[in-house]
C-alpha cells in the first residue's frame, strides 16, 4: 500500500513538472528529432557518397587495367579503348545469336555466341602472351645495355633508362616498354607514380627477372641506391637461364602442325569427296552443310572446338624465358 501511494505521488510530481515545463520539453524533443533526422540523413549521404566513390574507384581501376592490357597487347593507348573492346565483344556475339537462333539447337547457339563474345578477350590474351614471350627473351640484351648506361651515367637510373630506350635496337619489345617508362618517369610527381609505372613494366614482361629488375630500378630511382652489383648478378642468372633454355627448349612442333593444318585439310577432303565420289554439286554441298540443322550444327561445333584447340595450343606450347 505504501509503495502504491509513493508511485502515485511520484507520478503526480512528474506530471506537474512536465506540465510546468511543457514548452521547453516540446522544444527539446523537436530539437532531438531534428538532430536525429538530419544526422541520419547526413550519415546516409556520407555512406552513399563513400559507396559511390568506391564504385567509381573500382570502375576507374578496372578501366585503367583494361587500357593498360590493350596498350601492351596491341600498342594502342586510348581512353575509349575499353568501350571499343566491349563493343567488339557484344555486337558480333549478338549478330551470331540472331543469325543462328532457331536454325540449330539452343546449346550450339549459345556455344557459338559465347565463343564469338570471347574472341576479343582470347585474341588479347594471345597477343599479351606473345609479347611477354618475346620480351622475356630480350632480357639479356636489355640488362647489358642498361648496366652499361647506368655505369656511364654515374649511376643515374633515370638517365640510364632514357638512353637505353634510344640505343637498344635488338630488343624492340623492351625498347617500347622503356620508352613508356622513361616518358612516364619524366612526368611523375612522386614515388607513388613511379611505383605505378614500374608495376606496368613488371606486368608487361611478367617474369621473375623482370620483377627483380623492376624492384632494383624503383630503389635506384626513388632512394638513389646503387644497384649495379645486383643487376650484374641478375644478368649472369638470365644468361645461364638462356643457355639452359636453348639446350633443353627445342620443341617438337609435330602436334602443332597437325592441329594447325591437318584439320582444315581434312575438312577440304570432305568437300572434295562429297563432290567427286557422292555426286554432289557445290551448290548441293553448301545446301546440306549450311542449309540443314544437322549440317550447320556439326560445322558450328567443329569450328568452336577447333578454335579453342588452337588457343589452347598457343597457351600451352610457348613458354617465357624465366629463372
Image (cartoon, rainbow, N blue to C red):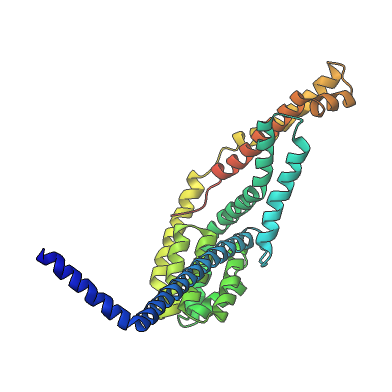
Q: Quadrant of residue 35?
A: bottom left
In this rendering, position of residue 135 left or right of residue 30: right
Q: Could you say which is closer to the camera, residue 103 or residue 242?
A: 103
Indicate the position of residue 280 as horizontal and vertical percent values. Answer: 87, 19
Indicate the position of residue 178 as horizontal and vertical percent values. Answer: 57, 70
Count of labels in the image? 0
Q: Could you say which is closer to the camera, residue 249 or residue 21?
A: 21
- Judge whether 264 appears above or below 121 on screen: above
Residue at 66% x, 66% y is: 77
Quarter of the image with the C terminus in it: bottom left
Residue 262, visible in the rendered structure: no
Residue at 27% x, 75% y is: 15
Quarter of the image with the N terminus in it: bottom left
Indicate the position of residue 64 as horizontal and vertical percent values. Answer: 58, 65
Q: Quadrant of residue 204?
A: bottom right
Q: Quadrant of residue 102?
A: top right
In this rendering, position of residue 138 left or right of residue 222: right
Residue at 50% x, 75% y is: 193
Q: Residue farthest to the left?
A: 2
Residue 200, visible in the rendered structure: yes
Indicate the position of residue 58 as horizontal and vertical percent values. Answer: 53, 63
Q: Could you say which is closer to the camera, residue 70 or residue 27?
A: 27
Q: Residue farthest to the top?
A: 278
Amino acid at each position: 500500500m505504501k509503495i502504491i501511494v509513493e508511485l502515485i505521488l511520484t507520478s503526480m510530481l512528474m506530471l506537474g513538472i512536465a506540465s510546468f515545463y511543457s514548452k521547453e520539453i516540446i522544444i527539446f524533443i523537436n530539437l532531438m528529432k531534428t538532430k536525429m533526422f538530419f544526422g541520419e540523413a547526413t550519415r546516409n549521404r556520407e555512406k552513399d557518397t563513400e559507396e559511390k566513390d568506391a564504385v567509381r574507384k573500382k570502375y576507374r581501376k578496372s578501366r585503367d587495367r583494361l587500357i593498360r592490357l590493350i596498350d601492351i597487347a596491341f600498342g594502342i593507348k586510348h581512353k575509349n579503348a575499353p568501350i571499343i573492346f566491349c563493343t567488339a565483344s557484344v555486337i558480333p556475339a549478338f549478330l551470331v545469336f540472331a543469325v543462328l537462333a532457331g536454325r540449330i539447337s539452343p546449346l550450339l547457339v549459345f556455344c557459338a555466341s559465347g565463343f564469338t563474345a570471347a574472341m576479343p578477350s582470347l585474341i588479347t590474351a594471345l597477343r599479351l602472351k606473345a609479347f611477354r614471350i618475346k620480351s622475356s627473351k630480350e632480357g639479356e640484351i636489355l640488362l647489358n645495355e642498361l648496366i652499361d648506361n647506368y655505369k656511364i651515367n654515374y649511376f643515374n637510373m633515370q638517365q640510364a633508362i632514357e638512353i637505353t630506350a634510344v640505343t637498344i635496337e635488338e630488343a624492340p619489345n623492351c625498347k617500347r616498354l622503356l620508352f613508356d617508362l622513361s616518358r612516364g618517369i619524366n612526368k611523375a610527381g612522386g614515388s607513388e607514380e613511379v611505383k605505378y609505372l614500374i608495376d606496368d613494366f613488371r606486368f608487361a614482361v611478367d617474369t621473375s627477372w623482370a620483377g627483380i629488375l623492376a624492384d632494383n630500378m624503383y630503389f635506384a630511382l626513388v632512394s638513389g641506391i646503387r644497384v649495379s652489383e645486383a643487376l650484374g648478378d641478375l644478368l649472369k642468372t638470365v644468361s645461364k637461364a638462356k643457355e639452359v633454355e636453348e639446350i633443353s627448349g627445342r620443341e617438337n612442333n609435330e602436334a602443332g602442325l597437325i592441329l594447325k593444318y591437318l584439320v582444315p585439310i581434312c575438312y577440304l577432303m570432305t568437300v572434295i569427296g562429297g563432290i567427286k565420289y557422292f555426286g554432289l554439286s557445290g551448290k548441293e554441298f553448301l545446301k546440306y552443310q549450311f542449309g540443314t540443322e544437322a549440317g550447320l550444327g556439326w560445322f558450328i561445333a567443329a569450328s568452336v572446338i577447333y578454335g579453342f584447340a588452337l588457343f589452347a595450343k598457343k597457351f600451352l606450347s610457348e613458354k617465357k624465358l624465366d629463372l
